[in-house]
Image (cartoon, rainbow, N blue to C red):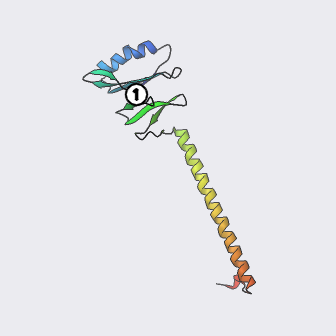
Amino acid sequence: MIELLSSATVTVDKGAKKDLYQNVWRVPNYFWFHPQTLELAGFHLVDGRYEALVPTDAGWLWSDQLQLFLGTHERQLRCFTVEGELIPLPEEAERQANEQAQQRAERAQQQAQQAQQRAERLEALLRSQGIDPDSIA
């Protein structure tokens, strides 16, 4: 469970809601994040009680349920892999895929141009040797 804090809800989110998730719903992991202050805290359930998660040197918190780290990147709550790689947001992943497709298309176009230039050079060489390239089957 990840709770987004606001000035209006911070007391309830850190108190009554945390107790509810711990005592009634027994949610294994509970995190809160405040988008304005960038406060990030996390807890995991141990013997029925929440224990605070210790952040990494980067300030990230491990989520057993997600098998990912939670942390901030460019003032946003983001997920990171075990290896520390930022998991792209859907729009970032789409942009990356589009950029990769464009790069592949550009490479294919360059290869086609190189092949055309090679064919033209070979044709010129054949003509210089008195051979009509169009007559070759």
Q: Position of residue 119 (x, y in %)?
A: 68, 74
The residue positioned 63% from the left and 64% from the top of the image is: 111
Q: Is residue 125 above or below residue 76?
A: below
Numbered disc total: 1
Q: Position of residue 3 (x, y in %)?
A: 43, 23
Residue 24 in view of the camera: no
Tell me which corner region of the image, top left, top right, bottom left or bottom right, holds residue 113. bottom right
User: In what quadrant of the picture does the N terminus appear?
Assistant: top left
Which element carries disc 1, helix, strand or loop?
A: loop
- Density class for disc 1 (Cα within 10 Å; few <14, some 14-19, many ≥20) is some
Q: Position of residue 36 (x, y in %)?
A: 53, 20
Left or right: 22 in relation to 8: left
Left or right: 94 in relation to 55: right
The residue positioned 50% from the left and 17% from the top of the image is: 6
The residue positioned 42% from the left and 41% from the top of the image is: 83
Tell me which corner region of the image, top left, top right, bottom left or bottom right, holds residue 134. bottom right
The residue positioned 27% from the left and 24% from the top of the image is: 46
Q: Is residue 103 above or below residue 137?
A: above
Residue named by callout 1:
55
Left or right: 64 in relation to 58: left
Q: Position of residue 90 (x, y in %)?
A: 52, 39
Q: Residue furthest bottom?
A: 130
Tell me which corner region of the image, top left, top right, bottom left or bottom right, holds residue 120. bottom right
Which is nearer the eye, 49 or 20? 49
Which is nearer the eye, 32 or 23? 32
Residue 44 in view of the camera: yes
User: In what quadrant of the picture does the C terminus appear?
Assistant: bottom right
Q: Amino acid at mark 1?
A: Pro
